[in-house]
Amino acid sequence: MSEPKGSLTAAQYEIMSAVWDAGAEGISVADIWQAINQTRAIGRTTVLNQVDRLEKRDWLARVPADGPTRFRATLTREDASRQLVAGFVADFFDGSTVELMSALLGSEACDLTKKDVDKLRKLLQQARRREEGQS
């Protein structure tokens, strides 16, 4: 299976979240619609059209089964997040993770707790160890 093409809109990410939450057995379009419809009104046809687009772009794959067609994600949530973030950093920060972090940490929306800072420190230490291991 090929890598998913393009990025995701907020609505498509919402669909993907329902698919990821369903697990490996997959989920039907009706079940995706019901999951999203619990938090906001959306038409079944809208969900069907978005699922079709996501399948054509290799974000979703059909699960062979009896009954209604079921879909599963072609990437884990974590792998998809990494791919989406990499595209975002490339598109908006010229590929610079440092510029992204500077923008995040320098914004007024940044309200990190001590626990958040500790987690970031741990992630930075892990990144340093990976970098040192590659040198």
Image (tube, grey):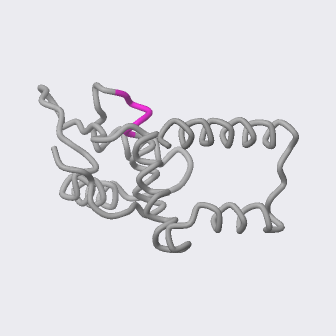
Q: Position of residue 135 (x, y in %)?
A: 50, 43
Q: What is the magenta range?
A: 19-23
- Front residue of 50/122: it is 122
Q: In front: 80, or 102?
A: 102
Q: Quadrant of residue 77?
A: top left
Q: Position of residue 44 (x, y in %)?
A: 33, 54
Taking the magenta stretch, the answer to whether it contains residue 20 is yes
Q: Quadrant of residue 53?
A: bottom left
* Residue shown at 47% from the left, 40% from the top: 134
Q: Is residue 38 magenta?
A: no
Q: Residue at x 15, y 29 (%)?
A: 67
In the image: residue 106, left or right of residue 68: right
Q: How many marks?
A: 0
How would you classify the magenta stretch by its main secondary structure? helix
Taking depth in this image into account, of 47 and 5 the one nearest to the observer is 5
Q: Residue at x 29, y 59 (%)?
A: 45
Image coords of residue 82 (percent x, y): 46, 49
